[in-house]
Every structure is written in C-alpha cells, then in structure tokens.
Image: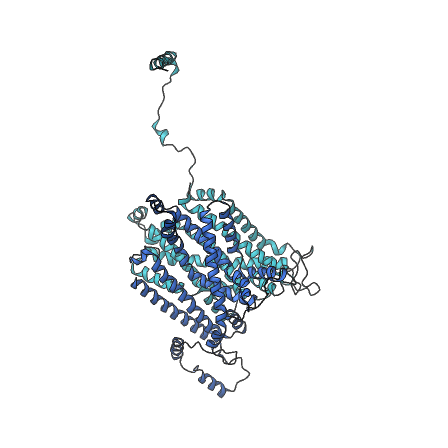
Chain colours: A blue, B cyan
Amino acid sequence: MLRYMLNKFVFFFLAMFVLSSITFILMKAIPGDPFISEKAVPPDVKARLLAQYGLDKPLFIQYTTYLTNLLSGDLGISMKLANRAVVDFIRDSFPLSLRLGIAAIFTSVIIGVTLGMTAAFRHRKLMDSTAMIIAVLGVSVPSFVMAAVLQWLFAVRIPMFNVVGLVQAKDYVLPTLALSAMPIAYIARLTRSNMLEVLHSDYIKTARAKGLNSWTIMRRHVLRNGILPVVTFLGPLTANVITGSFIIEQIFGIGGLGKIYVQSIGNRDYSLIMGITIFYGLILMTARLLTDIAYGFIDPRIKLGKRKEGSA
Amino acid sequence: MTLHNQNTAAAELELALTTEHFQKAVVDHHDAEAIERASTSAWKDVWYRLSRNWTAMTGLCILTALIVMAIIGPWLTPYDFSKNDLMSTSLAPSEKHWFGTDDLGRDMFARTWMGARISLIVGFAAAFINLIIGVIYGGIMGYVGGRIGDIMNKISEIIYSIPDLLVAILLVVVFEPSLLTIILAFCLTGWINMSWIVRGQIIQLKNQEYVLASRSLGASGMRILFRHLLPNTLGPIIVMLTMAVPAAIFGEAVLSFLGLGVQLPAASWGTMINDGTKVMLLYPWRMLFPAIMISLTMLAFNMFGDGLRDALDPKLKK
C-alpha cells in the first residue's frame, strides 16, 4: 500500500513537471517577444524591459527560474491586464468556480449512482430502459447545447430562474444541471453495468446460500463492489467539470476562473493562459492522485500488493 | 392394468411386424463428420448479432445518412456556404433557405453540411492517427514486454496524466487554429487509451499455443505481431474507435466554442453553435440545426458503439 501510494506520488510530480515544461517550451515557441505588440519601443527601453522580466538571460536559466517560481506558487503576471499577477486572478475568481464545480460533482454522483442502481435492480423493466434512454441522451447532448436549452426553457419561456449570474442559491440550479448532465449519464451507465455484473456473480449466490439477509448482502458485497468503478471515474469527472466550466460560465455569465481563462484565450494573453493552465493541471492531477489513493483503500486487491497483469 | 395384460399386448404387436417392415441401415461414418450448416466466420457472426440489434442498426443508419449528407449536402442547395447576401440576413427557415440564414445572409443549410464535413474530418482523422500510433506503440509495448515494455508503459502513464484538453488548447493557441493543428492537438494524448487496450490484449494473447506454433515454424516477431496478434485484438480496437471519433468531434466543438476552431469563412458545428447561442432568443434556428446535428452524431456513435461492443463480446453470445 505504501509502495503503491509512493508510486502514485512520483507520477504526480513527474506529470506536473512534464506539463510545466511543455508550457514553458510552448511559451518560447511563440514567435517574437511579449513586447512586440507595443508601439515602436526604443531599443534601450526594450532591453531594459527584457532585463526586468529576465528574458535576456539564457533559456536554461529562464527555465530554472520559471520552475523555482512555480514551486513557490508564483505563476507569473498577466501581459495584457496591467501587470496583475496570475495568482490574484485565480484568488478572485476561483472560489466561484469551485463552488459550482463541487455542486456539479455531488449532483452527478448522487443522481448518476441512483439512476444506475435503479436501472440495475429493475433490470429489463420500464425503469431500466427509461434510465438508460436518459443516459444515452445525456451522453449525446454537448453541455453547451444543454445549457442553452435549459436557459431558454427554464429562464426565458418559464421564468423560474435568472438567465445569467450567480448570486442567490437558486442561480446554481441551471448551471449545475448543465454541467452535470454528461457525467450523470456516464456514471449511471457505469453503475448499472457494474451492479448487474456483481448481482449475477457467484459470491452473491454464496452469500445468499449462507443465509445472510439481503441488507447485509447489499451493504457488504453488492455496494462495495458495484461502486468501486465509480470511484475511478472521479478523476475524469473533475476534468469534465473543469472543461465544462469554460463553456457554462460563459453562457450563464458567471465571473469564475473558466470565464477568465476563455477571455485570456481571446486576448491571446499568453502568460495568463499558461498560468491558469498550470493551475488547472494541478487541480486535475491532484484529483487523479486522490482518486488513485481512494481506490487503493477501497480495492482489497491493491492492499495485498498484487496487481493484475495487463490492467495497469 | 396388470402386468399380464401388458405382456399380451406387446406380443400381439410383435406378431404384426414382419421382417419386411425393416430395412438394413447403411451406416457411413463419414456422414457423422459432415457439417450441415455453412460455416460462418467470426466476423459474419458479429455482423449477424449486430444486425439483430435495432439500436445499433439505427445508429449505423443515422451515421450513414450524416456522412452522405456531409458529402452531397452543400450541393443540394443553390446557395454557396460562404457567400454573403446582405439583403437576406437572419431569415427564418423557409422554402428558399431550408435552415434559414445567418447574420451575413449565408445559407444555413449549406453551412450546416459544410460544418459536418469539418467535424467529421476532425473526428475520423484524429481517431485514425490515434489508431496508428496506439496500435504500434501498444503492440510493441505488449509484445516486447520486459524492461522496455515497462518503461514505455510508464512514459504513456505520464503523458496520460497530463490533461488532454488543456494541452490541446495550448497547442492551438500557440500554433494558430487550423484544421491540421486541431487534429494534431487531439492526437497528443488520444492514442494512449488505444495503446493500453492493445497492450493488454497482446499480453493475454502472446502466450497462446498458436503463437508458439507460429514461432516454432520460424515466423519472425513482426510477422507474429501483425499476422496473429493484432488481428485478434481488432474487436476491442474497433470499439475504442467508435468512442474516439465522437470524442474528437466533441473536443473540436469545445475548441470552437473557445474561439479556437477553424477560421472563417469555414465553419464547424462548434463555431456555428457558438455564434448561434449569442442570438439564441432572436434567431433560434441558427443554433438549433448544428446543435441537432452534433447531438445526432454523438447519439448515433453511442448507439452503434454499444451494439458493436455487445456483438463482439463472446460472453454475451447466446
């Protein structure tokens, strides 16, 4: 177990290192320098600007400075917006995105698992096919279409909710639904197929034959094995919610980090793009790391230190 | 009824049968070996099971229809997809403009199907490149195995843990959006899942007897890999492909939504939806048609892919 966790930690740092290196290389691959758009800067001023930002030093020195800055939590400064630090943008706008993201993750897991389990227990009955039709539709409709339709239906046609903004509690309903539609569908399908597999497995029959009551079987055998794969989905789920937030925040006019990111792409504010990318990468990889560790705790096979060949 | 009675009944029956009633059977032992039904190949079997699955077939029909329309659609209307007509901007769907027009008076029907071309090209091209890289990398990783395979596996794990869409966004930002950069952006990390599936299958297969037989007949490693191992992993590879194509189409739509899609006058479904959402309340058809098409594509791929997975799974065979 310790070895397993250590292994995952090493991967986390390696991946983070590769991501930061890629961003650095890409930043340098952009033709010209950050001040090329300024109006006819005199050569000596330009030299001083370059010196101030350390851009006159050799690439390797720039690279190591960049990495040490990252380690101390310095993501650089925006090139277009009055020299504001990237970290400040994140501090201001991320809490909003975080709240929305957490709401979406909880909604997806709760509704998705419920839907999937209902479908599995009512296998080949009306509830099953209804749940699966919802799931297939959920996977098929992109989140921006879902958001637009929800907005039109529940804010314009039937004015139940506000069209844009995120002020009151009920403002969370539409963006959360739009964000979690696709994960709900994935989780429902995943839960259903796993539950079906577990319910038909031999050890459930054995447990029944031993005379365990159905609640105990449910709690100790079915749920534990049926939910396990959903835990592995938490990493991709976080990724899904983050990429979804770029779009959803735009459509619902929420001033979260997703919106800032999209704006920075529109402005070609390279240092802001890179900084936020690293930040998102950090969140995603932390989510994946936590998922792996949680999986290690739940899956008894990993505790024994054995890993199935070919399943890595 | 007593035992005695039964015996007499049997005796009467015996009397009624004479040797003329019997015929000597000719037993040909070769007949027992003959196969009554025409033999089916594994792929015919898969197709048989697939064709019984109406959801999968519906998906296949929708897909075929979409592809055909992507090819001929823009020619079905006299209007050019990129030609502005400032006298007829933002018209509702009518007899002249079947899907209406956009803010520059361009015909939405022609644009929708030109968008289909872009979206489908991105989807298929990205999936195809991922297939090639994934199969080669995964094949080597699984077949060579040992230390080299381990190192290759670790490398792929590191690349996999880098968030794909973020790298795609970065790449397209730096190298300017074009069809090529968008496709390549999805190939950076997209091949990893494919390579893992191939690796897992090959590790399972490479110790089978027929591989040993082939090796003892003097087949080279490459021949074993490409003639024996890869064809047997085709099933999971195809299922993976049916997921990779819609994933790339979806990713392209997200990039377009962020303003990183193909550049004007070309349009993909993503860019059209992005433009459409801004005026959704005034001109809903501008978003509606591309949105329906992209959802239909996703739906069709999902339906077909699910059916294909079931058809290829020998465990589900009845």
> Up-down: is A220 above or below B47?
below
In this view of the protein, which residue sits in the foreground, B318 or A251?
A251
**Is A249 on the left or on the right of A285, as rendered?**
right
Q: Position of residue B236 (x, y in %)?
A: 41, 51
In this view of the protein, which residue sits in the foreground, B199 or A123?
A123
Q: Check the image and name the residue furthest to the right.
A: B87
Residue A253: quarter of image: bottom right
Task: Give me the residue at 41% from left, 82% from top.
Answer: A57
In this view of the protein, which residue sits in the foreground, B48 or B131?
B48
Whether residue B184 is visible here, answered yes or no, is no
Whether residue B42 is visible here, answered yes or no, is yes
Residue B155: quarter of image: bottom left
Please state the total of marks drawn on the protein image: 0
In this view of the protein, which residue sits in the foreground, A214 or A283?
A214
Quarter of the figure with the N terminus of chain B: top left
Q: Position of residue A245 (x, y in %)?
A: 51, 66
Task: Give me the residue at 37% from left, 29% from top.
Answer: B31
Quarter of the figure with the C terminus of chain B: top left
